Image: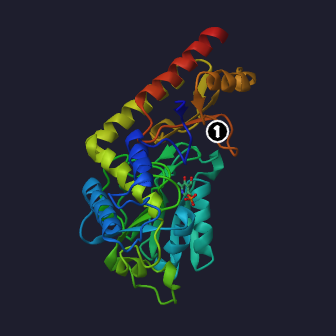
């Protein structure tokens, strides 16, 4: 198979080990003589995958017994609605740090008095708002810990006087998290934990059941807690790959170990951006994401953008085009992105600069 340096923002690079195990399971799953996508989700063999996957989540993130781990369809976008359905009685505040935060807020506005407590829209979401005070009379406060499109990240667990809810689609399992501080952590799997098709939700059980509205069965977290994420047929294959991805993460030392690797990878790329006269980073330095590194051509070099893109492509770089709403470049360097890929991108930037500067 042709190997490239995959910087896609999601779906994205996954660990080779997880891909290989998944291919094997498509041929013969757990000695059943069937592909993993052919077995009953009520079978003993499948039940073991679900149990293993749940317990790996618990172990890797040190999830307390107060919280349940769920695997759900509909992606993170469906979770935007779950959040409002399950937690919004009257009022909720959102930290508006990008397009995904806005989309989450939009769903809540349809069900109650939801508003942006603070926003970084004034500077194209290039920073994380600070200095806001979380009101105590709201049902919850919602944050997006990593802003995939703009390359900003909240890399710490904030203190909140009200239930804290976080979309961690693009930085889950990239660093240790104090899960006990959150009423809900959710996200799509397709960055750090597997392929598209499954979302994860880590929900504090006693934070549920506080709203008076009717919650449709499939949108009620309690349905999925009671059903062990198998109230209806679960997305079997994405969960299988997720489980293999978690096994890989555990094998390399878990979130403490990957955090160090991620900080190192992001460090060498940001150092190059700051050093190289041709490029400039777009996110505020103190809020830089270690998952999505966004940069543009420096003033005076803008006309070289397409040329650099082509130069990088020729050298095997894939997916470094910035999101269509911000332009420039974005290197997504999630957990499974090898340090060698980041080094290759850095060399590419250096060689291009040597030709042009
Ligand atoms: C931070 C964040 N939230 C939500 C989403 C939406 O995810 P999904 O496509 O699973 O609905 C994305 C997708 O990239 C994202 O980056």
- Above or below — where is 31 with respect to 155? below
Q: In this rendered view, identify the residue nearer to me: 60 or 107.
A: 60
Q: Can residue 73 be seen in this view?
A: yes
Q: Residues within 10 Å of mark 1 (few under 14, many from 20)?
A: many
Query: To which quarter of the image does residue 40 belong?
Result: bottom left
Task: Name the element at disc 1.
Answer: loop
- Above or below — where is 179 with respect to 108? above
Q: In this view, does 119 lie to the left or right of 247?
A: right
Q: Where is residue 73 in the image (x, y as percent from the top left)?
A: 51, 68
Image quadrant where one finds the C terminus: top right
Q: In this view, does 288 lie to the left or right of 31?
A: right
Residue of label 1? 322
Q: Is residue 17 left or right of residue 216?
A: left
Query: Would you say the beta carbon of the disc 1 residue lies within 8 angstroms of ligand 1?
Result: no
- Above or below — where is 1 with respect to 149? above
Q: In this rendered view, identify the residue nearer to me: 49 or 321.
A: 49
The extreme right residue here reads: 303
**Which residue does the image show at 60% across and 24% down from the upper left?**
279
Colour pattern of the rendering: rainbow
The extreme front residue here reads: 33
**Which residue does the image show at 41% across and 85% down from the upper left?**
210
Q: Where is residue 181 in the image (x, y as percent from the top left)?
A: 32, 63
Q: Can residue 276 be seen in this view?
A: no
- Above or below — where is 348 with respect to 242? above
**Which residue does the image show at 46% across and 59% down from the upper left?**
237
Q: In this rendered view, identify the residue nearer to me: 271 or 251.
A: 251
**Which residue does the image show at 42% across and 82% down from the upper left?**
223
Q: Position of residue 2 (x, y in %)?
A: 54, 30
Image quarter where ligand 1 lies = bottom right
Q: Where is residue 14 in the image (x, y as percent from the top left)?
A: 45, 43
């Amino acid at each position: 198979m042709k190997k490239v340096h995959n910087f896609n923002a999601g779906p994205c690079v996954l660990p080779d080990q997880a891909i290989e195990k998944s291919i094997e399971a498509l041929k013969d799953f757990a000695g059943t003589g069937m592909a993993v996508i052919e077995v009953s989700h009520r079978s003993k063999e499948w039940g073991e995958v679900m149990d293993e996957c749940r317990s790996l989540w618990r172990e890797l993130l040190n999830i307390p017994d107060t919280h349940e781990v769920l695997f759900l369809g509909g992606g993170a976008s469906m979770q935007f609605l779950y959040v409002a359905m399950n937690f919004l009685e009257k009022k909720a505040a959102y930290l508006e740090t990008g397009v995904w935060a806005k989309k989450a807020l939009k769903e809540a506005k349809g069900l109650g008095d939801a508003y942006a407590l603070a926003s970084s829209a004034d500077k194209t979401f290039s920073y994380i708002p600070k200095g806001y005070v979380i009101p105590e009379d709201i049902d919850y406060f919602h944050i997006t810990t990593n802003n995939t499109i703009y390359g900003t990240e909240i890399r710490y667990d904030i203190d909140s006087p009200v239930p804290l809810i976080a979309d961690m689609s693009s930085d889950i399992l990239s660093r240790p998290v104090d899960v006990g501080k959150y009423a809900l952590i959710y996200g799509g799997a397709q960055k750090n934990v597997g392929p598209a098709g499954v979302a994860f939700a880590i929900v504090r059980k006693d934070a549920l059941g506080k709203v008076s509205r009717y919650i449709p069965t499939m949108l009620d977290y309690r349905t999925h807690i009671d059903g062990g994420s198998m109230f209806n047929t679960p997305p079997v294959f994405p969960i299988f790959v997720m489980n293999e991805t978690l096994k890989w993460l555990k094998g390399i030392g878990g979130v403490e170990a990957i955090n160090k690797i991620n900080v190192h990878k992001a460090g060498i790329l940001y150092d190059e951006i700051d050093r190289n006269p041709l490029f400039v980073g777009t996110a505020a330095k103190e809020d830089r994401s270690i998952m999505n590194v966004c940069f543009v051509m420096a003033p005076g070099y803008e006309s070289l953008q397409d040329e650099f893109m082509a130069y990088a492509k020729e050298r095997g770089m894939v997916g470094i085009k910035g999101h269509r709403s911000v332009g420039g470049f974005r290197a997504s360097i999630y957990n499974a992105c090898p340090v060698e890929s980041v080094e290759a991108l850095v060399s590419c930037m250096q060689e291009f600069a040597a030709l042009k500067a």
